[in-house]
Image (spheres, rainbow, N blue to C red):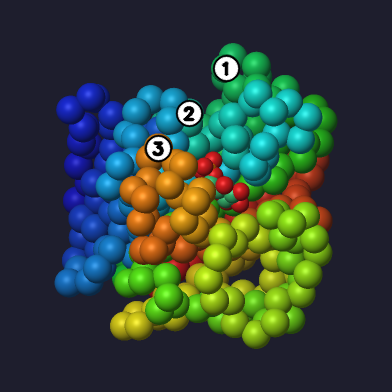
Amino acid sequence: MAEHKKFENGFEYIEVTNKSARARIALQGAHLFHYERVGGKPFLWLSETSFFEEGKAIRGGIPICWPWFGKHATEPGLPQHGFARIFVWQLLEVNATDAYSTEVTLQLKTSAESLQLWPYRFELLLHITVSRTLTITLTTKNRDEHPFKIISALHSYFAVSGIDNVYVEGLANTPYFDALTKENRVQQGRVHITEEVDRIYQNVHYPLILHDRDRTLQVDGQGSSSAVVWNPWIDKCAGMGDMPDDGYKTMLCIETANALQDAQMPAPGEEHTLTAVIS
Ligand code: BG6
């Protein structure tokens, strides 16, 4: 079942419920901000002080960073992480495959507004499969006459019992760019979070496993060889208006990405698909 819902301020989302899971997807940003299996706890972290407002990204769930990641390379005044997460997408289809699985498809296309921010014609499709496994597939189609560069991420915020209880497995010996020190380093062993972390891993071999005290989540990326691991830690978290001061203790971002050397350059008529399978 899928219900079209609104918050009091009119902010719209779709709530999908089936025998496996429940999910909520905002039309702004095609932003999945809730997913939980029947009888289980939410997979995704959502800030209790997040904005659900036009033009502001939701803090939590899975924002879509596209067609650039972080600050724009040359124009710092443009929206951080691109515009896909703050534009309203069109809901194309909700398809209940069976009682246990629902597929939702949303689309974003070139508009006068997008051309002001990014001078290319494109079509983006996001397929979300809500079942025992959560699958998110972002397809970029180049509808322009020129190739364009896309740097993107499925910026997944995972809910954790306590940041001290978790570690990420699957990145040992993987090179990464440390966005805080601007150094290139190589991961030694598992990733434990004991301070602010903002890293872009390269040559990633999925799956990545998030171990928590009483749960293990697997992130399997396809069409991706880079992944971002981010936790703002104490000071940055305290400075964020849409995150409680202790929010950093209960979240960890593991983002299936196309970043740095893994940026994509589809030619006219070509497409690229980035997928995260979370189970
Ligand atoms: C992460 C980036 O993916 O997103 C960080 O690596 C950034 O550098 C973080 O701070 C949050 O970004 P935003 O725009 O949602 O506050």
Q: Return the residue nearer the eye: 1 or 40.
A: 40
Residue position for label 3? 241
Q: Residues within 10 Å of mark 2 (few under 14, many from 20)?
A: some
**Residue 207, horizontal then vertical, whole percent:** 57, 76
Residue under the point 50% across and 78% down = 167
Quarter of the image where one finds residue 222: bottom right
Above or below, comparing residue 144 to residue 262 in the picture? above
Which residue appears farthest toward the front when viewing the image? 235
Residue under the point 46% across and 56% down = 234
Query: Element at badge 1?
Result: helix
Residue position for label 1? 113
- The answer to whether the residue bearing label 3 lies less than 8 angstroms from the nearest atom of ligand 1 is no
Q: Is the C terminus in the top left, top right, bottom left or bottom right quadrant?
A: bottom left
Query: Element at badge 3?
Result: loop
Query: Which one is in front in this view, the residue at disc 2 or the one at disc 3?
Result: 3
Residue under the point 65% across and 43% down = 69
Residue under the point 46% across and 63% down = 252
Residue position for label 2? 87
Quarter of the image where one finds residue 78: top right
- Residue 8 visible to the viewer: yes
Q: Residues within 10 Å of mark 1 (few under 14, many from 20)?
A: few
What amino acid is found at the position of numbered circle 2 in the picture?
Phe
Above or below, comparing residue 261 to residue 92 in the picture? below
**Residue 215, horizontal then vertical, whole percent:** 34, 80
Query: Element at badge 2?
Result: loop
